[in-house]
Image (cartoon, rainbow, N blue to C red):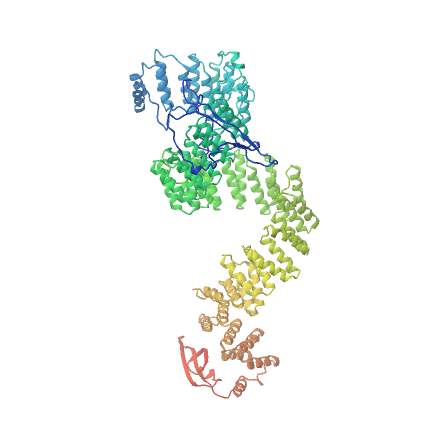
Amino acid sequence: MLHSGSYSYSQSHNHTSRELGHQNLLQLNIYSPSKLLSLHSPRVFIGFNNNHLKNHNFSRRKHCPLPNNALLGDKRVLYSQTQKQSSKESKAFLGFKLQCHSKTLTLPTKGFTVNGKKKKYGGVLPSILRSLESNTDVEKTLHSFCENLSPKEQTVVLKEQRNWERVVRVFEFFKSQKDYVPNVIHYNIVLRVLGRAKRWDELRLCWMDMAKNGVLPTNNTYGMLVDVYAKAGLVEALLWIKHMRLRGLFPDEVTMNTVVKVLKDVGEFDKAERFYKDWCAGRVELDGLELDSMLDSENGSRSEPVSFKHFLLTELFKTGGRVKIGGSSDEETLVRKPSLTSTYNTLIDLYGKAGRLKDAAEVFSEMLKSGVAMDTITFNTMIFTCGSHGLLSEAESLLDKMEERRISPDTRTYNIFLSLYADAGNINAALECYWKIRNVGLVPDIVSHRTILHVLCERNMVREVEAVIEEMKKSSQKIDVHSVPGIVKMYINEGLHDRANNLLDKCQFDVGFSSKVRAAIIDAYAERGLWAEAEAVFYGKRDLLGPEKAVLEYNVMVKAYGKAKLYDKAFSLFKGMRNHGTWPDDVTYNSLIQMFSGGDLMDQARDLLDEMQGAGFKPQCLTFSAVIACYARLGQLSDAVDVYQEMVKAGVKPNEVVYGSLINGFAEVGNVEEALKYFCMMEESGIPANQIVLTSLIKVYSKLGCFDGAKHLYKKMKDLEGGPDIIASNSMISLYADLGMVSEAELVFKNLRENGQADGVSFATMMYLYKSMGMLDEAIDIADEMKQSGLLRDCVSYNKVMACYATNGQLRECAELLHEMIGQKLLPDGGTFKILFTVLKKGGFPSEGITQLESAYLEGKPYARQAVITSIFSVVGLHALALESCDSFTKAEVALDSFAYNVAIYAYGSSGEIDKALKTFMKMQDEGLEPDLVTSINLVHCYGKAGMVEGVKRIYSQLKYGEMKPNDSLVKAVVDAYKNANRHDLAELVNQDIRFGFDSQQYSDSEIEAESDERDPVLTTFRVLILTKTLTGNLLACQMTGSVPIRWSRTAIAEKSVSVVGIWFHRS
């Protein structure tokens, strides 16, 4: 299928001496792509023998215009060069001769309008036409110049009027002249102009006037009426032929060609061929000639069928319908053969669009044999036919033959190749083709620009698009409004929003936008979730005399709000559209209902569904299914069933999505009976079970532990195209895991992994299975593979792997995953913290500290979550991360609870930042918080790491002499602190105290110190740094040097008016 610049071809026929003639039957369709229907005909290769041109590379071809006196004849016979093929090949290779006879083949004449230039007339006609063009008073001008014109001159004046009102006024003036004799040529001109302008009332009056004056319609009259009615999308078009036959007229070749083209353009290929063959046989069958419907090319509305009886009863056809125009029986029974180039062109296009390439080639060959002159349109049509069927080399060969026969390619020829190369993905060739149009002396037209811009914009080729636009500016050509949405979309995709806005402003100022174009621009923003930009276009300035916002624009704006989940804005827009003169249509309702259903806003969706039906609109099946699916998803199954019954009552047939939603909904709640009921109803309605339905049933059986039923359905799914989906396979793995069937689960998982289908649920279920079976090594392997596969995308998947690591004692890996999870902006949930508390327990974090953190977390205290995370990093040795996490709350300007200070002291102490730990302790006291048991444990931890034995002793003495309640964790912390300070002797004494229940008489503090001194009687010189706090609250640091006993008493310092906060002993 070609892009918007694609061509739809039929024949071109010029206005000649045959009164009015027919409109060109090979025209460019610039509004919509040409859709080629394939009738599954065998593929045919059209071969051309061209020994001197082996490579048909379009980009290297040069256009060489020939002089006017060049020979027109070419008696060489070109035949297809059969390629070597295996005898087993089934593809047919069609060869035919391209013969040109010098006596019959001539170049197309140029006595018609070219590039907008009018014909040149002699005599008084130029001055008359100029006067009519410049003066608004048509009658005055006519009285001055046109009273004595001949019929031929009158015909010219009529034909040159481009406005239907002027045509009617000029015609009325001619009829008012005394010497005027009504003739069919003039009436044909007026009827054609009125038909093209869709002025059906005026056309009816003209037809009645024609009958009143005794002017009988001719073949041209009927052919023209068929043409204008068909182009307007009216189904009455071909009924004119029936009317023509009733009057005794047999269609001539031009009229026949028009009918064939009309049928071809609406896709009625068989009827078109039958009409052509009947005409050749000398008959016109009237039965079956009606069109079922036709689409109006402008407003998109579809015309309903009209019976021939109703057609004849209208006033339009009653008038003059009784007169039968004589025609000889010989004329009707005469076997005919087409002789016009335009007829052959139409037939080639007919067979090409029907996918019958062989028949198109035969018509082309017959044209050559019959000596019918070929023209540019013939080759354009054949090039398009070959290229659109994938025979691009054959199309290029036709271009060679075209030039050999002195038929110059036109802009349309290059446009066809441009589209063909684009469809083939050869963008470079498409670009070369576009630029070559100017190089050969032609001018790109609106289709050239539209096609190349469409191709480039689809691929976001900004630089190339802007080069084309710049070239258009140099040629004073404006961007076609239909190209603007594509360019805007390209800019949006590349993030160039300013350029998109500038383009919109310029094009709005130059030409303005229709509702369709504006809706397409809004949709471009909507697709990217840019609702504010879409809103700016929707509410933006528009022409003062332009139309109000169309319902299409409202519908696309609703879509923009829906994609951004701005449901209130969408509903407000819907409520206000009536106030602006626009009424919602079925698309509006369907979009809103589906949007609200997707957002689980069932009250609004349900109300709109009722309102829609009350307004006389019938909801789509998709709309009902969206509502049912939402109710089922929310567990409101009774409401889902009500909507289902309402759907059936409204005459809307449920599809597999509806049944699948109901089956899945009942499966989720374990209601097997209802799920199976709707499954049976689905099968009874003739809808085959798809993967979704079977998956839902497997979920039912899995929840019930019904192994045989699930296994049967899973086996059935394997027979479907594509096999079981990931949800069904995961359900089977889960079922096998619950039943402890390791090998069966491994088999399903292996298949998923080999096919690249395994997801996070698959891995998590296998980890669960291995863990439950005690196969921790296998569970860890799965966890590692899941991590490396990039399947950790949410909290659930991270939690599964972290739990596996925690179970296996891999605490550091667990903490690293936590850091990775936070880095991906995933907030830990309740499951995550449950695992983290387990890690703290396994990591040796004080149990009292864990209890304190759990309490703070459950109460939702400030920074409780951050404190837990800090503790995790500290306990596994990730100190840099711990300090970074700790700073996030210690530097916060908010009052902290004791648990936060305790965690900070622990984190700083564990990382060796003793100064910060002790300063944090002081800050805690300054805030009026009394140290608790966890504080003492963490301080002992700090003192031990720093070798501050006196600090450990001080806290231990408080414990020993009853100032603090006995606590195993604190005692253990003291022992560990002594060991960390390399005082194993003191650690052993504490252990003895534990064994003897803190016997203060036997082991007093002084005796412990004395015993210590006896082991080291030498007095040691220390530099003592005493951090004190005065009574006024100021911090002082004083240094004492000299010979100070190691048992230097804190009492001596306390006698001074200071309180000791911390003491650092540094051996000199």
Residue 670 in view (yes/no): no
Between residue 14 and residue 377, name the one nearer to us: 377
Q: Quadrant of residue 142?
A: top left
Position in image of residue 534 (x %, y %): 43, 43
Between residue 415 and residue 70, name the one nearer to us: 70
Position in image of residue 165 (x %, y %): 37, 22
Q: Quadrant of residue 145?
A: top left
Tally of marks: 0
Q: Is 1032 rendered above or below residue 445?
A: below
Q: Is 956 rendered above or below residue 480?
A: below
989 on left or right of 585 = right
Between residue 50 and residue 143, name the one nearer to us: 50
Q: Residue at x 48, y 68 (%)?
A: 904
- Quarter of the picture containing the C terminus is bottom left
475 on left or right of 565 = left
Q: Is 698 rendered above or below residue 89?
A: below
Residue 985 in view (yes/no): yes
Give the residue at the far right of this rendering.
Answer: 708
Position in image of residue 337 (x %, y %): 51, 19
Position in image of residue 221 (x %, y %): 45, 18
Between residue 759 and residue 74, name the one nearer to us: 74
Q: Is 739 rendered above or below residue 434?
A: below
